Image (spheres, rainbow, N blue to C red):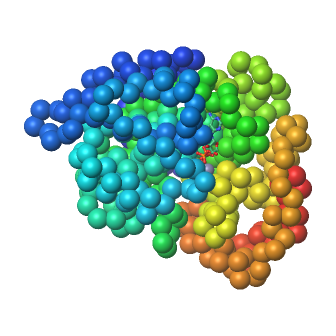
Amino acid sequence: MNLFRNFKSVTKTCYGRGSFGKFGEILEPHRNAAPGQARGGFMVFLVDHYFQGNEAFLSRIPKQAGDEIIFCSTAKEPTTEQIDGLRDDILARRGLPAGLVGIGGGNVMDVAKALSLMLTNEGSSVQYQGLNLIKKPGIYHCGVPTISGTGAEVSMTAVLTGPVKKLGLKCDWTVFDQIVLDPDLIASVPNDQWFYTGMDTYIHSVEAITGTKKNTFAEAYSEKSLEMCREVYLRMDRSNSKSDEFLMVASYMGGLSLTYSEVGVCHALSYGLGKVLEMHHCFANCVAFNQLEDVYGDYVQEFKGMVKHNKVNIPQGLAKDWSEETISAMAEVAYNLPHMWDHAFGPDWQQVLDRERIKGWYRRMRSTGSANG
Ligand code: NAD
Ligand code: ZN
């Protein structure tokens, strides 16, 4: 079908082992205030708290006098309150930076994307949750993923949890100006997390090509991403040097496949789990996808094979205590994502889907409580 989507891509992409070593050179031209612009000429590096105290890693960040490192906790997914607070603090202490760099996973990269926009747009980020609500371009911003799968490095959204909605700041200006994809940086990710986050790109790729908005462009990215996921999670040992290279590229391609199509049932259910139970996005996807054989068929079988092959530990009994109230609240969040249902079931989705059907999927998660099935 014709979609006529016209999306902005990441402006510059640097890929390869050791490419993080080139980051100083890459940043240099962006350090000075552009003529006529009141920019401070300093860089802010937002760094995943995992790296706090890791001097070997921190010394590789091309920090110059006047630059600042801010460590970001990933205990919770980014919130509108967190972004507003960071913005207010940086502007009050230092004024407008020349640029922002997010070094970390989907969490820290989304913080960098959202903060870049909120440094130049007045008011609270809550008012900009949605599509094309941002009024002005943000500041120069770069993403350096240290864990792969979400596709946040390439997507046009920065997902934020607000007081009412869990919804992205989505517009052309959200997209990074520069990304540095260095497979060396993801080697230290613990196995379980490596699996959950990697499965996000597998699920993006499946959902993008199994709905009404699928198209040849999305399918091309999806097929390559799925092929690489199969290599990483079914055939290769993680010690194989190709494994991290494949996963990093699969994440990028899966992100593009969904950008040119849409996510579906699994992500809708995952948003409910995230908003109501504060479950991590990628883990929630695994919990949901495991129960969706009626929608995604053989892909769910394949996913289960990957869980088994990698001996992934998914805590048992997570869902056994969900009350009907909790299930209703999650179903409400999921139901209110019409673009995902439209993609999954077509424009008449309300004829095949109601809140009861959504609750049924959540109850299935309650009965097993484990992505191991
Ligand atoms: P994350 O950023 O939450 O990181 C997961 C864990 O891995 C954290 O504990 C982190 O400290 C740790 N970690 C990161 N790099 C590491 C490394 N090299 N070695 C060891 N540990 C490391 O996880 P994620 O799964 O990448 O991202 C999830 C977030 O991404 C959520 O906030 C979700 O909303 C967002 N997301 C965004 C998009 C988008 O398009 N913008 C898409 C999907 C998900
Ligand atoms: Zn996702």
Asked whether residue 137 is in view, the answer is: no
Q: Nearer the viewer, residue 11 or 258?
A: 11
Q: Where residue 243 appears, x then y in whole percent? A: 72, 24
Q: Where residue 230 appears, x then y in whole percent? A: 77, 32
In the picture, the quarter occupied by the C terminus is bottom right
Q: Where residue 48 appears, x then y in whole percent? A: 54, 41
Asked whether residue 51 is in view, the answer is: yes
Point out the residue furthest to the left here.
36
Please state if 179 lies on the left or on the right of 74 as rendered.
Answer: left
Q: Residue at x 17, y 32 (%)?
A: 34
Q: Residue at x 55, y 68 (%)?
A: 338
Q: Quadrant of ligand 1?
A: top right
Total marks drawn? 0
Q: Residue at x 27, y 23 (%)?
A: 29
- Image quadrant of residue 329? bottom right
Please state if 13 lies on the left or on the right of 337 as rendered.
Answer: left
Location of residue 32 with respect to 271 vertically, above or below:
above
Q: Residue at x 49, y 43 (%)?
A: 71
Q: Where residue 98 appears, x then y in whole percent? A: 27, 37
- Image quadrant of residue 337? bottom right
Location of residue 36 with respect to 168 vertically, above or below:
above
Please state if 350 lies on the left or on the right of 311 as rendered.
Answer: left
Location of residue 260 with respect to 317 vertically, above or below:
above
Q: Nearer the viewer, residue 36 or 131?
A: 36
- Image quadrant of residue 340? bottom right
